[in-house]
Amino acid sequence: MSEGIEIKVLNKFLAEKRDLSVYHHAARSANLIGIDSRITFPLRTVEEEDYVHISVVRGPGSLKQECVVDLPFWLDFDFSSVEEGVIRRTGNRTLLTIPPGPPGWQVKVTRSPGAADIPAVDYITIGNSDQVTGG
């Protein structure tokens, strides 16, 4: 088994104070991450069939402003949403922008096979558009 990459998932929702549901397949672990919280775990290779599934915990009310999912460029992802979203690559990051509305989106991320120059530690940040700056 090859070494994993340490991935840190940060929840930076401020206005809505929504929790995130994070499922890590290799560890068979499911976690709820509250506002300004984080979780770190090793993301293994595609060959090891590891992935992370992230979604906003459903509850009353809609997202009041845009939500941004900030991903490393070297991750592969499947993104689905009940609303339209925008996918943009900027530098070494991929930004998924979800408009205000119901929190009906999810993203599944895997480590890209054969990606070069992958750092030992990287992060995924999810939160209000004015709060997600990375790092």
Image: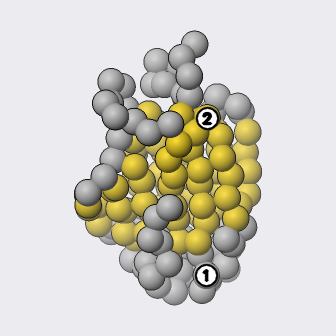
Task: Measure how far apart labels 2 and 1 are at the Cα level.
Answer: 27 Å
Q: Residue 69 at x, y = what percent? A: 45, 62
Residue at x 37% of width, y 62% of height: 96
Q: Residue 23 at x, y = what percent? A: 65, 44
Q: Is residue 7 above or below residue 65?
A: above
Q: Is residue 87 above or below residue 24?
A: below
Q: Is residue 79 left or right of residue 125?
A: left
Q: Is residue 11 left or right of residue 118?
A: right
Tell which tag, 2 or 1, sits nearer the viewer.
2
In the drawing, what numbered circle is on residue 32? Answer: none
Quick one: SS at disc 2?
strand
Q: Where is mark 2, residue-wise?
A: 42
How many C-alpha atoms fall within 10 Å of the one at disc 2: few (<14), some, or many (≥20)?
some
Quick one: SS at disc 1?
loop
Q: Amino acid at mark 1?
A: Leu
The image quarter containing residue 46 is: top left
Q: Is residue 32 above or below residue 66?
A: above
Q: Residue 12 at x, y = what percent? A: 58, 71
Q: Is residue 134 above or below residue 47?
A: below
Residue at x 56% of width, y 28% of height: 4
Q: Where is mark 1, residue-wise?
A: 14
